[in-house]
Amino acid sequence: MGIYRIYKDDNDASRIEPLPQDSPFWAEVKTASTMFLKEFPVGTFMDWHPAPRKQVVIIISGTLEHGFEDGSKHRFGPGDVRVLVDTTGRGHTTRVVGDEPLLVAVIPLG
């Protein structure tokens, strides 16, 4: 399990970094009042896009791969947490990999 922040750098490119569990960011998560589940079918691919809102996404089942402008790709599986704050710019790509649908819990943030 890992916790990662996806953010926009000074050049409008989305980047990824580990997010420590003691980050002050978690205070904002504690005040969230909504959560919903979303399922993506096997083979889903979303071309370049920013996050639709500032949100925390926890993978419940399945495997997800994000692609970034620097050519890197990162895979996430059950228990991985992604904090998406790249709400502007080109964003990242998203692909469901493997042979099972992706199920995530989404926590929108203010």
Image (tube, rainbow, N blue to C red):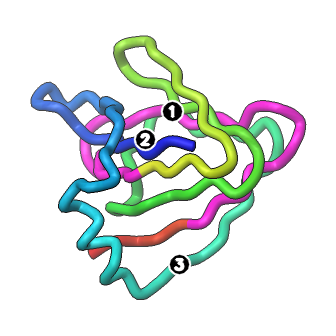
Q: Residues within 10 Å of mark 2 (few under 14, many from 20)?
A: some
Q: Position of residue 32 (x, y in %)?
A: 36, 81
Q: Is residue 3 left or right of residue 40?
A: left
- Magenta-colored stretch includes residue 94: yes
Judge whether 27 appears above or below 48 on screen: below
Q: Nearer the viewer, residue 97 or 81?
A: 81
Q: Quadrant of the C terminus?
A: bottom left
Q: Position of residue 96 (x, y in %)?
A: 71, 38
Q: Are marks 1 and 3 in contact (CB under 8 Å)?
A: no
Judge whether 20 appears above or below 14 on screen: below
* Disc number for residue 35: 3
Q: Are marks 2 and 1 in contact (CB under 8 Å)?
A: yes
Alpha carbons under labels 2 and 1: distance apart: 6 Å
Alpha carbons under labels 1 and 3: distance apart: 23 Å
User: Does the image show residue 56?
Assistant: yes
- Mark 1 or mark 3, whichever is nearer to me: 3
Judge whether 77 appears above or below 109 on screen: above
Identity of the residue drawn at 53% across and 26% down: 74
Identity of the residue drawn at 45% across and 15% down: 72
Q: Judging from the image, what secondary structure is the residue with disc 2 in?
A: strand
Q: Residue furthest top?
A: 71
Q: Nearer the viewer, residue 95 or 4?
A: 4
Q: Residues within 10 Å of mark 1 (few under 14, many from 20)?
A: some
Looking at the image, tell me whether mark 1 or mark 3 is earlier in sequence order.
Answer: 3
Looking at the image, tell me whether mark 2 or mark 1 is earlier in sequence order.
Answer: 2
The residues colored magenta run: 83-105
The residue under label 1 is 93
Question: Based on the displayed image, in which of its 4 quarters is residue 105 positioned?
Answer: bottom right
Q: Residue furthest front?
A: 22
- Look at label 2 and name its amino acid: His
Q: Position of residue 100 (x, y in %)?
A: 87, 44
The residue under label 2 is 49
